[in-house]
Image (cartoon, coloured by chain):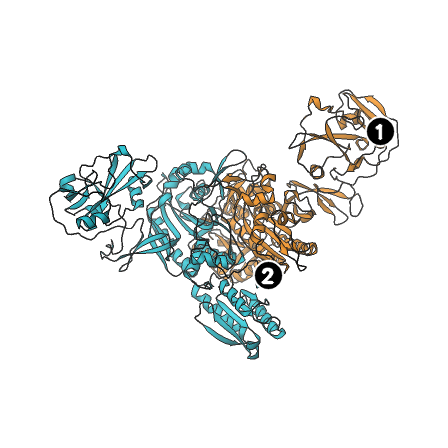
Chain colours: A cyan, B orange
Amino acid sequence: MLVRNLLGSRYKETPKDCVIASHALMMKGGYIKYMSAGSYSLFAPTKRITNKVEKIIREEMDRVGGQEVMFPVVMPATIWEESGRYSSIGSEMARFTDRNNAKMVLGMTHEEAAVHLARDIAASYTDFPFMIYQIQTKFRDEPRARGGLIRVREFTMKDAYSFHTTQEDLESYYDKCFTAYERIFKRAGAKNVVAVKSDSGMMGGKISHEFMLLTEIGEDTLAICSECDYKANLEVADCITHEIESQVEELVEVATPNVKTIEGLKRVLHVDPTRMCKAVVYQENATDDYIVVFIRGDLEVNETKLRNYLKTEVHPASGVSEDSGIVAGFIGPVGFNGKAKVVFDKSLMGIESFVCGANKADAHFKGMNISRDVGNVEYVEVAKAYNGGICPVCGKPTITLKRGVEIGNIFQLGKKYTESMNMTYVDSDGERKHPIMGCYGIGVGRLVATICEEQHDDYGPIWPISIAPWEVEICCLQSGDEGVKAVSDGLYKELTDLGVEVLYDDRDVRAGSMFADADLFGVPVRAVVSRKTCDRGIVEVSLRNKTFKGEVSMQTAGQDILKIVNDLKAEYNV
Amino acid sequence: MLVRNLLGSRYKETPKDCVIASHALMMKGGYIKYMSAGSYSLFAPTKRITNKVEKIIREEMDRVGGQEVMFPVVMPATIWEESGRYSSIGSEMARFTDRNNAKMVLGMTHEEAAVHLARDIAASYTDFPFMIYQIQTKFRDEPRARGGLIRVREFTMKDAYSFHTTQEDLESYYDKCFTAYERIFKRAGAKNVVAVKSDSGMMGGKISHEFMLLTEIGEDTLAICSECDYKANLEVADCITHEIESQVEELVEVATPNVKTIEGLKRVLHVDPTRMCKAVVYQENATDDYIVVFIRGDLEVNETKLRNYLKTEVHPASGVSEDSGIVAGFIGPVGFNGKAKVVFDKSLMGIESFVCGANKADAHFKGMNISRDVGNVEYVEVAKAYNGGICPVCGKPTITLKRGVEIGNIFQLGKKYTESMNMTYVDSDGERKHPIMGCYGIGVGRLVATICEEQHDDYGPIWPISIAPWEVEICCLQSGDEGVKAVSDGLYKELTDLGVEVLYDDRDVRAGSMFADADLFGVPVRAVVSRKTCDRGIVEVSLRNKTFKGEVSMQTAGQDILKIVNDLKAEYNV
């Protein structure tokens, strides 16, 4: 491909609305064009990249026995009504009515379609297991589209669905997919990828993992043990607290005029927050009913755990009503009779005396002992894990929190969809049963953007050769010079004939401008031909990641560059 | 791939609702699954076929300098409002409102998106020409979905858009794409493909061609000259009539009680329909205003031509209102004063006397002469071409009408979109101008279905090897026999290692059942291994299209079959 024929502009300035590097570089480099919130057109370099990512994904899905299929993007609401998700999913699912007044939805995931495809066909236990996958467009009416291709509304996704007759078979296949995902990310060139336990969310099912690319710009927080293999999304990470020394004390009411915060209490009462019983107020989304969570003063509530415990959606209360009987800022478990459901976090267990609110304005208790002053309460874990917390696996205080972007996920779905949509098979014992499902997703564009986020410098992306839009860029510095042009043209033809993917810049522009563009293209291998190199009988070769810069003979340049390319590709097994 | 691992059932019975062979065979063979009107999921064999079709398309688009890009499926209404098509396209465009109340549409074509992508970038004449294309999902809320993948609502389409600074450049590129399309269809194995001149319809522009696969099940009718190269869609085919001998006669009113049809008049008055002036009543869609078309009695009105002449959408009137002054069944041009626009078809020119309605009940005129009895009228061509009509190119009476399915189309769009969406560039003369566009479409699924329609027998599709889901099917007739199984397994491994795509059936089923399935899979090369073949030291090899059946030595089977495969592939240049 000739740069002068390529549609797309490269810019010097960073667009103002880009706050992360990959977004800025992909805009500056002519990779993507904004069309509407969370929706981009892809220029040719990006399509070349995504085609390569999709090829790697296909190879690895096929290797674990996957069959590529294709589901419709637009689906009738009826199959989503069968699963119950037509009503349980909110406005992130786009809906419309077709010309015959039938309700339609845009696919944001395809469990329903997968069951629809398989349910009349896989009728005997001998038809199992199998895995079907597709690579296709999805639309999620995401409220927080941001960061270029990191979080969009329309995206290309590989989604796979496996069907099994036993939990053991699902688990063993799940492990295979886990390994396949590791291979995919490795071959695509992503470096800092970790798999963490995750919350299954709207997908249902119990066990699930997210593959996270660790980066400061990540929206997710991960709890990772620095001593063992434990890794979990903060949403589901266990919160195991250090033991806090405390002794039984007398319950005493103290005046705390206008002191409504943990910080304020610490200042006034000289008590460490680990010895305070904090109250956090939530409301149920559906009813606005209040929920008061009592939790140790230094910890935060994990809303995912709270939602999963309550089995309903909740949000932090923005205030409390007069008639609720809740005295904001002074809530405590002793004598609490506000109109609210009360939840005690596990972090309060085993501590003998707390500071807590006295349920009246400007007053707190000291020396509160839950079993003595409140009675028997049920403790549940709804606290967020924290830096330095105890690892639930190795028991050491080595939990560290890191940021990551989710680039893939795998779920053990169980029978949620096969039961609701009545997919059955006849088992070897003659009984009719529901198969067990797994599902496995990778967002193609997001993977590309996070790799750019992970591997770039100030001047542009540094694409791994396995997904780079081209493998080699030839910069012809004086295309007006017939001799130089002839050498460049010859090298372009030779490499192309050898099967190397070459981007060829023979524009009549200054070297600085050409190199700036080349940095933005991020092509791994660069070959520079100029009057000077021709006079010396060489071609300058360098790597975009700056690990190599050298010269090859003009006579052997094609073969020499081919070898460099092949060596690089071998690292990624492409 | 092992047949026993493949998701999909093959059926003996033809589904009741299938009226065409490709639909029936693709349902029976486990290729597609109906989800909703005009919407199917594709099983693995179909996806394998479409992947190959897409690869051929990509190669040929790249060969003519195309750059693969990707546009969103969901687009903001705003860009469609810019082009004017948000209002000019009716209910076939699916629309919805997103969570922010923004109007969105589902892409049924992407001219707007192509201009949106290119308009800020291609700013100088030196940036032209270029062509961008994508292969992606489209949704058209088609009222007449039918025939499996032949006419659907959701489909995968290759759509390409070229941009030029001169009409000459567009035309020369258009010719290149024409040739690329011929190569694509040839390589995909479609046999009876013709390119015909077509109506540009909602796309705009003047010159356009449709690539039609000739088949009796086609919805389109084509006028094809059997003597020269003339080919046109009936919608735009010139209607050149034979000369009709006639003499001037006196205008005489005759009583024709209850005779309202051409057939009736012929019976009663013994006049040939070529000597009748028939009236056909239409209504404008927008206003319901009447249009009366006068046309020679043996001809039919071409609604596309009528619409293009009137520049408005029309439909046949289901009746006429009392106050219209139109006397249905007795309409004629003499003394007509109904409330209607009147159109005279060119077929009436040069004929000296007609039978026509007398504009009162139960009466017709004989001897009507238009210039004498009506005056000077404007003749326009709104008649359909007919079998045996005159070819506009060679002048012979050799027009024949054939049926075809449109599998691709190319349009010279002109400036319709670049003007309405204000895409400009600075030309070499320093002037700001609008580029000229071409666009080029191929429906992937429809192409596959029409090839199936063209190439099948009673037992299944006969896929050309260039797009076949697999190249070779191995039928192991006695998989319970260890020796037979070992030979089959070995052949499967050998061929797979040689890079041949093999479908392997080692199920424990009867030979008849296995062969019936194999016929439905339609794999070009079949290798049969059984106890009998093993005893003789051979493998039976046959072609699905029945042009070859023979034996190869067990020792050389792998290499022999590879050679057969490669010879077949060479025919399609894949």
Residue for badge 1: B373
Percent coordinates x, y for residue B237 in the rendering = 73, 43
**Which quarter of the figure has residue A502?**
bottom right
Q: Secondary structure at mark 1?
A: helix
Image mark 2: chain: A
Q: Secondary structure at mark 2?
A: helix
Q: Residue at x 67, y 27 (%)?
A: B318
Could one spot residue A421 in this view of the protein?
Answer: no
What amino acid type is highlighted by mark number 1? Answer: Asp
* Residue toward you, B543 or A476: A476
Q: Residue at x 32, y 46 (%)?
A: A206
In this rendering, the answer to whether A531 lies above or below B506 is below
Q: Residue furthest front?
A: A257
In this rendering, the answer to whether B242 lies above or below A1 is above
Percent coordinates x, y for residue B534 in the rendering = 49, 57
Q: Viewed as shown, does residue A316 lie left or right of A256?
A: right
Percent coordinates x, y for residue A10 in the rendering = 53, 60
* Residue toward you, B510 or B369: B369
